[in-house]
Each structure stands twice: as structure tokens, then as C-alpha cells.
Amino acid sequence: MEALILVLHVLAAVLIIALVLLQQGKGADAGASFGGGASQTVFGSQGGGSFFGKMTAVFALVFFLTSFGLAFFASEKAKSVSGAVDFVPSAPQVEETVNLPELGEKKKTSSDLPVTE
């Protein structure tokens, strides 16, 4: 099911890109810029909407819905993976103790570095 939604998602994205590139721009009509007959219509200078514009809206809705579907599948998969941390092996406990010097105790070292006092 997830693979089908993913295929629909990719196809919708490609079709949206193709439809947007095929549409004619607002300023592409030479008559519209001089107040031609199209500017006197009920819907304005663009008209009622082209076939490509309506199909772009349909495929945008499909893209939107498939995005939600993929997000749902991803959240379900994340819920099942959250218990995987229980299988990580822990570090072994250290049995021997390490004696650390006390604060203020000066440790004599045989180093070449100078000691500040």
C-alpha cells in the first residue's frame, strides 16, 4: 500500500511540474495589455480558468493527500522501531576501582613540563 501511494505521489509531482510549464502566463496575450475584448468578461481578463489550471489544482490535491498518507505510514513505522533501543548491548561494568588523588594533594611527576604553584 505504501509503494502505491509513493508511486502516486511521484506521478502527481511530475504532472504538476508539466502542467505548470504548459500553462500560458498572464502577460502572454498581447490584446490583454491594451484592454482587448477579454478584459470585459465577467471573470476578469483571465476568463473562467483553463483546463490546465483545473488539472493542476486536481493534481495538487492528490499530491497533498498522498503526502499525508506517506506521513502516516512513516509515523506508524517509527512507532514500531522505537523499541529497538532495548536490543543495544550495554557496556560491561568495570570491576576494579581507580584511586584518584585528593584535591590539594600534590603528585610528583617526572615530567619535563614546568609545574606552576
Image: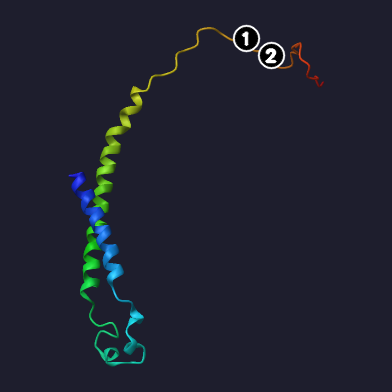
Q: Quadrant of residue 84?
A: top left
Q: Nearer the viewer, residue 46 or 116?
A: 46
Rendered-image quadrant of the C terminus: top right
**Residue visible at 27% across and 58% down in the picture:** 13
For residue 93, above or below residue 53: above
The image quadrant that residue 23 belongs to is: bottom left
Quadrant (top left, top right, bottom left, bottom right) of the N terminus: top left
Q: Which residue is under mark 1?
A: 99
Badge 2, how many Cα within 10 Å: few under 14, some, many 20+?
Answer: few
Residue neighbourhood size for the residue with mark 1, other residues' Cα within 10 Å, grouped as few (<14), some (14–19), many (≥20): few
| Residue 45 horizontal/vertical position (percent) | 30, 85
In this rendering, position of residue 71 left or right of residue 114? left
Label 2 and label 1: CA atoms lie apart by 9 Å
Q: Is residue 70 positioned above or below 42 on the image?
A: above
Instruction: Return the residue at label 2.
Output: 102
Percent across and percent down for residue 38 are 27, 89
Q: Amino acid at mark 2?
A: Glu
**Label 1: which secondary element:** loop
Q: Residue at x 30, y 38 (%)?
A: 78
Front residue (pair 107, 37): 37
Residue 6 place in picture, x, y as percent: 23, 49
- Element marked by disc 2: loop
- Type of residue at label 1? Asn
Colouring scheme applied when the structure was drawn: rainbow
Rendering coords of residue 76 (x, y %): 25, 40
With 10 as the anchor, is 104 left or right in this view? right
The circle drawn on residue 109 is none
Q: Residue at x 26, y 67 (%)?
A: 19
The residue sitting at 56% across, 8% down in the picture is 97
